[in-house]
Amino acid sequence: SYVLTQPPSVSVAPGKTARITCGGNNIGNKSVHWYQQKPGQAPVLVIYYDRDRPSGIPERFSGSNSGHTATLTISRVEAGDEADYYCQVWESSSDQGVFGGGTKLTVL
Amino acid sequence: QVQLVESGGGVVQPGRSLRLSCAASGFTFNSYGMHWVRQAPGKGLEWVAVIWYDGTYKYYADSVKGRFTISRDNSKNTLYVQMNSLRAEDTAVYYCAGAALGSYAFDIWGQGTMVTVSS
């Protein structure tokens, strides 16, 4: 089965840029979606199809995907961005959804 | 407003069954593929199952295949999952999530319902 690998944690100072990676075999050939989940809340879609933002998501959130790594970039990080972030793909060979293990973003 | 509301969670003994429901409102339910996603306490998200917008296709995670059955009633705007032969490792918050037609990005989520499998 397809595996997505994320770093368990990323720390960043307010106002700086956070980059959260999602590794997978030839993930650049797949569409990657990213979710933000705050404690006690349901996940929220923040990036879809590698780089598109749903309405209401700040422009500070951006995404890229190439080769074996997809990246969620959060610019000018704010305290309110502190959350768990998950990448997700659809594995068409098995018709199954796959999530990365999640990354806890800490704002210092 | 766009909303998904899960219900049916609770405490159940190992080997028993439970059915969860997810009521949709505020969007065109029959244009969405619907998924169940779960999250064990303190753990990450795990995809569980999908049913196509018209119910023609259903797919499952290996961990629940043969035990869980996903279904939908578009006339009632409701999604279901029948969970049989429950195990301790099925203990989790279960979320229903919707993905617009042709997409596998989950843009609508419910608030989740807790299922605890314990004797």
Image (tube, coloured by chain):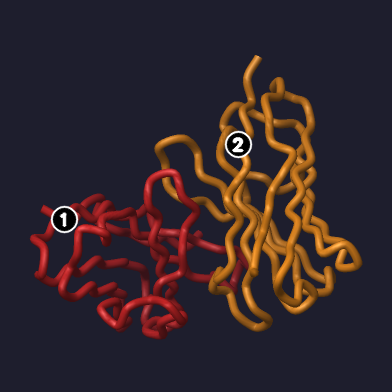
Chain colours: A red, B orange
Q: Residue at x 79, y 32 (%)?
A: B17
- Crowd band around label 1 with a 10 angstrom C-alpha radius: few (<14), some (14–19), many (20+): some
Residue kind at label 2, given as amino acid type:
Met
Q: Position of residue A45 (x, y in %)?
A: 46, 69
Q: Residue at x 30, y 83 (%)?
A: A59
Any part of residue A63 in sight = no
Mark 1 and mark 2 in contact? Answer it, CB < 8 Å.
Answer: no
| Residue A100 percent coordinates (x, y) | 39, 58
Mark 2 lies on residue = B114
Query: Hey, which quadrant is residue B53 in on the image?
Result: bottom right
Relative to residue B85, is residue B72 depicted above or below?
Answer: below
Percent position (x, y) of residue B5? 68, 53
Q: Position of residue B48 (x, y in %)?
A: 62, 52
Whether residue A85 is visible, yes or no, is yes
Residue lying furthest top in this view? B119
The residue where tag 1 is placed is A107
Q: Numbered disc 1: what chain? A: A
Instruction: Please tell me which residue is depicted at 74% across the width and 39% down the height of the picture.
Output: B8
Give the left or right position of residue B53, taking residue A54 as reference. Answer: right
Q: Secondary structure at mark 2?
A: strand
Q: Is residue B16 left or right of residue A42?
A: right
Picture quarter containing residue A103?
bottom left
Q: Pick whichever, A108 or A94, lies toward us.
A: A108
